[in-house]
Image: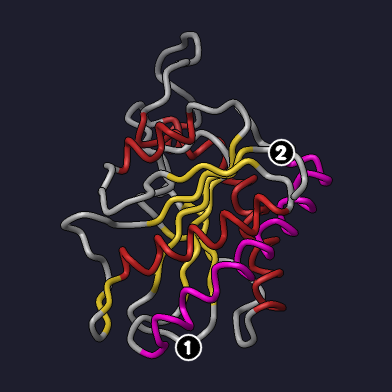
Amino acid sequence: MLPPSGPIIVLDPAHGGTDAGARGEAVAEKDIVLQIARSARAALERQGYRVVMTRNDDSNPSYDDRAAMANGYRDAIFVSLHVASTGTPRTVRTYSMLFAAPADPLGAAAGGGSARAGPPVALVSWAEAQRAYVAASRRLADLIQGEFAQAFAGSPSNSESVPVRALRSVTGPAVAVEISSISAVTPDALTASGEPLGNAIARAIVTFRQAGAGGGK
């Protein structure tokens, strides 16, 4: 195993506790993603990354608690793990955060300028924290998806940007990964995806960092 280096990887197994997530035959998403996260963590650590998990049991931290864990590190990459209820079996998709256009209560967009001048606002809403990292997160998502397309046959080549609640409060590069599907693949097949998933993410992060797109706080 290589000594820890580079950014800290925060793996976020979705759901937990009373929130089971998607359900298959005698299996729940919350349990599958936890097992996948543990396997992915081992694979990433073998590549020399330090990895932390937002949960390592059947707890259900709030979205804000999960984001706060990632935000507590100076240089972190956040990966939220999910299992889809539908989709082509044994494929994986990567998502980055998509925000709606910000509102302009002073009419700057329509009138060509603000009605009043003043210093820029330094405070950022917790719900808008990811907005400054959208471009970096999208680049990372595309790189990860490119690796998934090779590691998981049938997976798309490009990532997508959608509103993902788990990502919006993270102050750093953040993506969501969704594996298909809990209704069409056996639990053992799903959990076996953890190691190749971690290896693919590791390769993408190397490229991401070499391109100078660290996006740290």
The residue under label 1 is 88
Q: Is residue 110 above or below residue 19?
A: above
Query: In the image shown, does 57 or 11 lie closer to the viewer?
Result: 57
Q: Which residue is at 53% across, 47% downward?
A: 174
The magenta segment is: 184-213
| 22 left or right of 35 in image | left
Which amino acid type corresponds to the residue marked 2 in the rendered image?
Pro
Q: Quadrant of residue 58?
A: bottom left
Q: Which mark is residue 4?
A: 2
Which x, y percent locates residue 64? Answer: 32, 36
Q: SS of the residue at dot 2?
A: loop
For label 2, the crowd category at 10 Å Cα-Cα, with few meaning under 14, some 14 to 19 and many 20 or more, is some
Which mark is first along the chain, 1 or 2? 2
Indicate whether residue 138 is drawn in magenta.
no
Q: Nearer the viewer, residue 76 or 16?
A: 16
Q: Amino acid at mark 1?
A: Thr
Please name the residue shown 46% across and 54% down the image.
80
Disc 1 packing (10 Å; few <14; some 14–19; many ≥20): some
